[in-house]
Amino acid sequence: MGILYIVPTPIGNLKDITLRAIEIFKSESLFLSEDTRVTRKLLSLLEIDYSDKKFISFFDHNEERRISSVLEILQSGQNVVLVSDAGTPLLNDPGFKLVREIRLISSDSGEPCKIKVEVLPGATSITTALVASGLPTDKFTFIGYFPRKNGKKEHFVENLIEANKLLKTTYIGFESPYRVISTLETLKKVCPRDCVVSICNDLTKLHELAITGPIDMVLSTIKNLEKIKGEFIISFHVGN
């Protein structure tokens, strides 16, 4: 049986790649890539020859269709490397359904699947933003992307605030540059006065942005930016 390697890639700074990841990139020949062009570019920047490597596109809209063929490859004994465009695969990126399928496979005798899933630790914007925020880190909840429509978004945040009465957690979510201001305005409308918000953008890059404070201050800062681009990470915490 082959090994499925799940390999994180840098979220911005190329130096955040691990030695183990480089070793696997050099030694393995078959890659599942969220975007094959991005993976080839990364290997090129790392000065790794990929002329004899094969790249298979593997993203949200084709993951289910690819699973059976990937399982056949792994069962034949060939190793496969799963990478997303940036950060750790499966964390709001493709791969969850494939790993779940592997974990649920059992032999006729009922033994666990012999395909090995080897996960490398590495970069993820979720915990990087949390640590940079200055918000409590003892308990945190990743909520993915905020809903697009304002009505659903408001209802979603209301439910988070209600659940927080029990959870006492720091929430972390992703937001598009086109909706980041409207989401902050929703938080201002729905959250209690003691809510503290942190917003991060371009983490590990030259022009990294990390702001934490009352919603009004954070919202004003974002509105005054010359350019709003790239994915934002919004974290917020209610109470002490």
Image (tube, grey):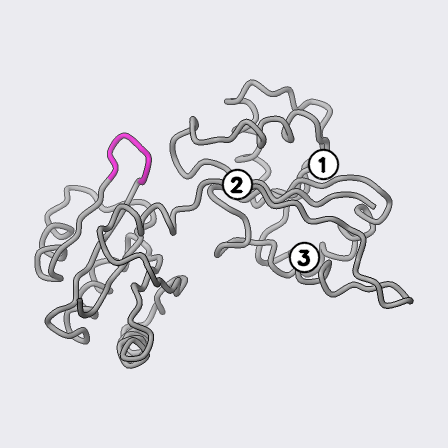
- Does residue 159 appear left or right of residue 57 in this picture? left
Among numbered discs 3 and 2, the one appearing first in the sequence:
2
State the CA–CA distance, disc 1 to disc 3.
16 Å
Residue at 31% x, 67% y: name it: 169
Element carrying mark 2: loop
Element carrying mark 1: strand
The x and y percentages for residue 79 are 75, 39
Residue 206 among those drawn in magenta: yes
Vertical placement of 74 versus 154: above or below? above
Q: Residues within 10 Å of mark 1 (few under 14, many from 20)?
A: some
Among numbered discs 1 and 3, the one appearing first in the sequence:
1
Residue 227 among those drawn in magenta: no
Residue at 72% x, 31% y: name it: 29
State the CA–CA distance, disc 3 to disc 2.
16 Å
Magenta residues, as a range? 203-208
Q: Label 2 belongs to which residue?
A: 8
Q: Residues within 10 Å of mark 3 (few under 14, many from 20)?
A: some
- Does residue 163 appear left or right of residue 221 in this picture? right
The x and y percentages for residue 61 are 59, 58
Disc 3 marks a residue whose amino acid type is Leu
Vertical placement of 190 versus 122: above or below? below
The C terminus lies in quadrant: bottom left
Element carrying mark 3: helix
Among numbered discs 2 and 1, the one appearing first in the sequence:
2
Q: Label 1 belongs to which residue?
A: 30
Q: Label 3 belongs to which residue?
A: 98
Residue extending farthest right:
108
Disc 2 marks a residue whose amino acid type is Pro
Is 105 or 136 nearer to us in this picture? Answer: 136
Kindly report which numbered mark, 2 or 1, lies closer to the viewer in this rendering.
Answer: 2
Total count of labels: 3
Vertical placement of 209 versus 214: above or below? above
